[in-house]
Amino acid sequence: MATSVLANDSQKFAELQKVIAQYKEQEGALMPILHRAQEIYGYLPLDVQNYIAEELGIPLTDIYGVATFYSQFTLKPKGKYTIGICMGTACYVKGAQKVLDKLQEVLNIGVGDTTDDGKFTLDATRCLGACGLAPVMMINDQVYGRLSPDDIEGIISKYKDE
Amino acid sequence: MEMVKVTIDGVQVEVPKGSTVLEAAKAANIDIPTLCYLKGINEIGACRMCLVEVKGARALQASCVYPVSDGMEVKTNTPAVREARRVNLELILSNHDRNCLTCVRNQNCELQELSQKLGVDSIRFEGESINYSVDDFSPSIVRDPNKCILCRRCVSVCRNVQGIGVIGANDRGFNTIVSPVFDMSLNEVPCINCGQCILACPVGALKEKDDTQKVWDALNNPELCVLVQTAPAVRVALGEEFGMEMGTIVKGKMVAALRRLGFDKVYDTDFAADLTIMEEGTELLDRIENGGKLPLITSCSPGWIKYCEHYYPEFLDNLSTCKSPHEMMGALLKSYFAEKNNMDPSKIFVVSIMPCTAKKFEAQRPELSAAGYPDVDVVLTTRELARMIKEAGIDFVRLPDEEFDPLFGDSTGAAVIFGATGGVMEAALRTVAEIVTGKSLENVEIADVRGIDGVKEAEIALGDITIRAAVAHGTANAKALLEKVKSGEKEYHFIEVMGCPGGCVNGGGQPIVSAKEHMDVDPRLARAAAIYQEDRNLPIRKSHENPSVKRIYDEFLGQPNSHKAHELLHTHYVPRKKY
């Protein structure tokens, strides 16, 4: 039974089915299936976990327990742009917290969350290795340095309008 | 059985090979503290309360999972053991919502008992504490994660005994929480409301939705005629709440207590159980004779019904259309009783005392309102009734025995056995046998369907037909049975399923039996023994011989499965999604 997330993209769903078929009969199938499922969908939504549960014949709670235990699995979709604001020591003393507060205000989401339009995910990261430019953030691969809270609105609006 | 010799605290005992150190210690009259251990259900050595010293082992060992070997020497009461147990307990307490005074499990809590036993006299570790919202959206079960000690007894019973698994241990470390997936409520996941998790919980993290105030309010409302009915399994368990031995029959005291609480009439769901046999027996014969859907599967257990709706919707047409007995009773009270007494059904308030949390959900099903009002207004569990009796200051143990009110309080031995697994099947066969053969049944006891084997089978030759019957209790057993029916490996005419292991005597609304008591006594057997004793005590043991049931058909319903009977006593089911 293909529900929304699964039905939305038949190519991804076919891939997921292939992965499950490949591992199904093996002992310890769950971890590799979850890894591949996250690669395919970018995260592990309810529909995907439920489908895996049905296919493996185990309760959904078994899968959810594993998905929430390991930090490399995520239950939320990532946005088109992942914003990583550096909270390393140098950035922090140069006011990264204020930049983060501003990001939360402008995007109206908390750390780890994604905007409703699916555009932005906000992460607080450890040192990005660009301490000379502190405070620093990255939006996907693009680095922004020597930030002040006043810069944020302008930078975000560029991506918003794309 | 191969035996091994073990020395525990200097006492030598002989125990069967394969026993755990915990069991061996019990044989040596030593009571090792436990928290996560629940015999046969959760044996995982997680809580570290049962630590002991085993000679030669490199560290302290969890006795609940450590198997004995011949010549083993164990010490259960050394300074190292006492210190380790105590620190573990203090760490659990550091993060526990310690509002014992207002907790439903006050004085009936394994954590509280251990704190007292291990001499914890202060909270040494005041660290960060958890603060979760309480999940009280389900009409049956309330989940309070702030009281949870992560023992996983509920997780095991739900997943392994019931074959469901709607709660699990999620997240990790300090944030670990026993909960449904994706922060959902129990009300949003395919929980069947059986309440086995409540029975397994050592603390107050899982409890029934308390509806006693609704009943107090009704009793206090002069405009309402408040009628009460009691399920068969309540009378063999209620006494435990007042310190009486498990398996004591307290029918007469229970009736007396209900009258003293102020109910206008005290009726017996057993009357409706006899009625169920008339309706369901007729339905069975009709399906056999007219090529209807077989096997016919019983519908008395609302936990089982919800299980079928979520997990086996392809069997919904196999379910008997009979409402569960207390719902039949409610429908009759708001129709026949109302007419006879010239009352508006809106002024009749029906309370069901049930061993069951699933019946709280059932009572809210919109289709169960034959007279335009819910057939049953409030369902209370055995535990909630005990609370009301205590609050009212009624000295239960010293109450005289009283009788149910006539007509809807009249019943047979066939009805009382509904409370144990196999009982509905046995009661139905007692009646069906006589209808088919036209002869009086000599031996009414059908041993094949009694006892606590997960799946029981019986073949009963009745003239030209041999009825093939099967009984399952606990939904994991039901699942195994249904899979065999589905694959064609097994064929039956009639299947009884009870959602709870052991049937209603071990229902999720019954008195809670501690893990320690579970090591000595099996409530499924002890309470069922009382049920079968009560059957033997009664002068009439076949449903169709209940004179009051005959009267209801003569005066009101006509024949079993008549149009009127269908309107009032039968229902339908809906497929439900899982997630």
Image: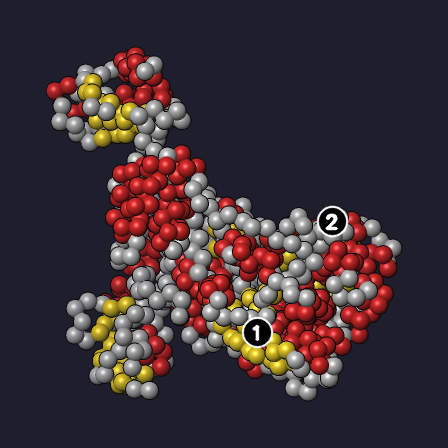
Specify the quadrant of the image occupied by residue A35: top left
Judge left or right: residue B235 versus residue B411.
left
- Between the C-alphas of marks 1 and 2, the distance is 36 Å
Judge left or right: residue B438 versus residue B9.
right
User: Mark 2: which amino acid?
Assistant: Tyr
How many dots with numbers?
Answer: 2
Q: Residue at x 13, y 23 (%)?
A: A130
User: Mark 1: which amino acid?
Assistant: Ala
**Coloured how?**
secondary structure
Do discs 1 and 2 belong to a common subunit?
yes
Q: Residue at x 33, y 57 (%)?
A: B90
* Numbered tag placed on residue B93 in the rendering: none
Q: Crowding at label 2, few (<14), some or many (≥20) Cα neighbours within 10 Å?
A: some
Residue B189 in the image: state x and y as whole percent.
48, 48
At mark 2, the secondary structure is loop
Judge left or right: residue A18 versus residue A50.
left
Residue B577 in the image: state x and y as whole percent.
51, 47
Q: Earlier in the sequence, mark 1 or mark 2?
A: 2
The residue carrying mark 1 is B469
Quadrant containing the N terminus of chain B in the rendered view: bottom left
Q: Please state which of residues B150 and B415 is positioned toward the viewer in this rendering.
A: B415
